[in-house]
Image (cartoon, rainbow, N blue to C red):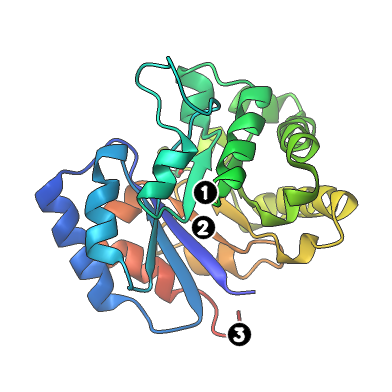
Amino acid sequence: MKKLIVGNWKMNGGLLENAALVQALLQGLPRAGVEAAVCVPMPYLGQMQQLLQGSPLAWGAQDASAHEQGAYTGETSATMLRDFACRYALVGHSERRQYHGESDDTVATKAQRALAAGITPIVCVGETLAERQAGRTELVVKRQLASVVHTVGHCTSEIVVAYEPVWAIGTGQTATPEQAQAVHAVLRAQLQAATAHAGRIRILYGGSMNPANAAELLRQPDIDGGLIGGASLKAPEFLSIIASVPAAA
Ligand code: 13P
């Protein structure tokens, strides 16, 4: 299974910056051994389709609506994402859970809608600092993942999971490789109990991943890639993270 490195641009970018960034990424991407993608703001999906079609860099959205269509002002359906040939859609990012009140159920429905449209949902889970300090990390991430597994059923093997401890996002405070691996092992076991094909589900780590800490994180047995925020906005940093994928992976 190739490692997967995904950039989450969050609400950053512009037509000119995006073009320069993806051009630099295309120039520096290795030919094989690793898969890479960028999840961009909705208005730029058409630009990505135009610039990246046929290239080794995949693209995706940062959200997908839980609704199929209709009177949901401001929402973007998974079917619409399909029109722009998105391979991925993040669902349940902690910033969506936190600022937009997304529940585990909503996130699960979003994952289901993405799958139904032929898009791979990258299901984000992760505990807050208070939850970690209260010893509830395992409970929280298992609850978040269980909701998705329950809803998507036999399609569980088609998802990507991203473990993003909320306290590590944008803070520069990365989980240690041991802390991350411990949670990834819990998630792997949960997936194994849910599907016979758990071995092909990638579990990404996200939260202040950067060129200095990526190699050690990506060497952990249950860390199958990364979900990168800040460092994905700078081509040299994102490429350096991609280059740090262990050769044997
Ligand atoms: P940072 O890499 O900026 O900490 O963001 C992580 C993240 O939220 C990716 O989805």
Estimate the x, y position of residue 20 in percent, counting from the top left: 14, 60
Q: Is residue 1 visible?
A: yes
Secondary structure beneath label 1: strand
Q: Quadrant of residue 53?
A: bottom left
In this rendering, does residue 127 appear at all? Answer: no
The spot of residue 180 in percent (x, y) is 65, 51
Choose the circle earlier in sequence order: 1 or 2: 1
Q: Position of residue 243 (x, y in %)?
A: 41, 76
- Please name the residue that numbered disc 2 is placed on: 226
Q: Indicate left or right for 186 with 14 as reference.
A: right
Residue drawn at point x = 64 percent, y = 61 percent: 223
Instruction: Tell me what residue is drawn at x 71 percent, y 66 percent.
Output: 200
Q: Which residue is mark 1?
A: 206
Would you say the beta carbon of the disc 1 residue lies within 8 angstroms of ligand 1?
Answer: yes
Out of 29 and 151, give the one closest to the viewer: 151
Q: Quadrant of ligand 1?
A: top left
From the image, tell me which residue sits under label 3. 248
Residue lying furthest left in this view?
16
Identity, as a three-letter code, of the amino acid under mark 3: Ala
Q: Earlier in the sequence, mark 2 or mark 3?
A: 2
Q: Is residue 238 left or right of residue 206?
A: left
Given residues 127 and 2, the one toward you in this image is: 2
Q: Amino acid at mark 2?
A: Gly
Asked if marks 1 and 2 touch (Cβ < 8 Å), the reply is yes
